[in-house]
Amino acid sequence: MRWELALTLLLCAAGVLAQDGTGAEDPAGAGAGAGAAAGGAPRYEVTEPSECKQYPCLIFEELFENLDLKTWEHEITASGNGNWEFQTYTNNRSNSFVKEDKLYIKPTLTDDQYGEDFVYGGSLDLWGGNGNNDDCTGNQFFGCYREGPGFNPQTREKNPGEIINPVKSARLRTKDSFAFKYGHIDVTAKMPKGDWLWPAVKLIPKYTSYGKWPASGEIDIIESRGNFNITGDFGQALGAGVVQSTLHWGPYWQANGFFRTIAGKPLDHDGFHKYGVTWTKDFIKFYIDNQPLMEINPETNFFEFGMYEKFLDIANPWSGGTKMAPFDQEFYLAINLAVGGTNGYFSDLWTYAPTTKPWANLAQFPMRDFWEKKEEWYPTWQGDESAFVVDSIRVWKIEED
Ligand SMILES: *[C@@H]1O[C@H](CO)[C@@H](O)[C@H](O)[C@H]1NC(C)=O
Ligand SMILES: CC(=O)N[C@H]1CO[C@H](CO)[C@@H](O)[C@@H]1O
């Protein structure tokens, strides 16, 4: 089985090979509870982390036989995740659904639901109703209520101003159902195709123990761009098929040290791949299809690793933590498909083909510029090919705390 190799690798890496030297022959734990799930995928017994006695010990398994909303909470917000991204996250089965044992997150147009020119003339109210699982989850950056600029009553021309987020999509998280500290995670997924699509699987700090982003860290297991042809400023290919993993960390957002902890790899456009992270008290190591992608070991601590002492007159936010701080706390899972944004993830300086980038990141109304070039990008979103598809997620504890 494919995952056996990865487990053997991570066991070696973590130095937890079985005492008798035979290695991990049955990583699921002496066959306990092993059996075939409905879809034929192997399913193993999932153990509460505190009950783990043998390692590796499976503590989370999601095979997406159904969309289990006890595990996965939908974020509901137009906030754009701090990047002025162009999507609204909703709980709608057109945007997030399970098909043939896989999770699909698929972008659709806002006007398809609310009517033509809604993004100019409407208002989007996501506040929701009294805690009935439909409440807005993020009000920052006007995330719960947005209004279009409207029309001139005489001429019926569109008023100047930013429009309502023109795309609907989804972000699912396990904030209240599952979080863990240290272990190995495998995610099997297929990247979406289509211009300006930005899929991600992330680990987010549950308690924000060291302060606001990125002081409490963020582990981006997967990120990619859906455009076929992007050429970076050093001539590097950055379009669909290139998948990146990143750690975000730093005393405040302008001093994010992510550029020291980012790596990517070109893959084929069409296939499912397995993305792994081994996270221990000493290092974090990323894998793609069992091949090591990047290993991060801060040696002393992340404050020294980031050389903050040298350049900034600022207290170390992680001084109360361990060597791995901020990555020494519980993190939960988030899966999303974003679109566009103005933070530079789609840089103005790169070359995009065959069409150019429809908005400038510092433009006055970037979402509107994007929307008004719809005929350039929308045809590149081809049905379910534009969906981010996640096949499975498994998490193991690999050693005793
Ligand atoms: C879900 O999204 C679809 C496609 O945009 C829309 O037609 C439908 O009305 C939405 N359903 C709900 C309950 O909002
Ligand atoms: C204009 C351009 O560079 N188009 C290329 C984009 O990528 C596709 C798929 O790799 C190529 O077939 C096009 O020629």
Image (cartoon, rainbow, N blue to C red):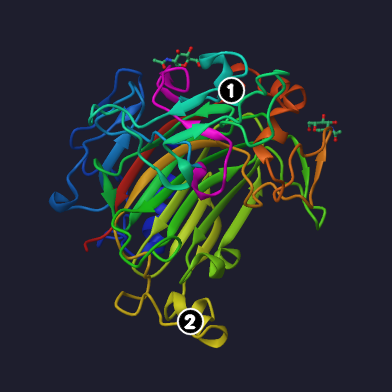
| Crowdedness near tag 1: few (<14), some (14–19) or many (≥20) residues, C-alpha within 10 Å | some
Q: Judge whether residue 69 is colored magenta.
A: no
Given residues 204 and 76, the one toward you in this image is 76
Residue matched to label 2: 304
Q: Quadrant of the C terminus?
A: bottom left
Q: Which quadrant would residue 186 be assigned to in this image? A: top left
Q: Position of residue 207 (x, y in %)?
A: 28, 57
Q: Against 246, is 354 above or below? A: above
First reached walking from the N terminus: tag 1 or tag 2: 1
Q: Quadrant of the N terminus?
A: top left
Residue matched to label 1: 121
| Crowdedness near tag 2: few (<14), some (14–19) or many (≥20) residues, C-alpha within 10 Å | few
Q: Which residues are magenta?
A: 80-103
Q: Position of residue 220 (x, y in %)?
A: 49, 51
Spatial CA span between label 1 and label 2: 51 Å
Q: Position of residue 373 (x, y in %)?
A: 75, 28
Given residues 9 and 223, the one toward you in this image is 223
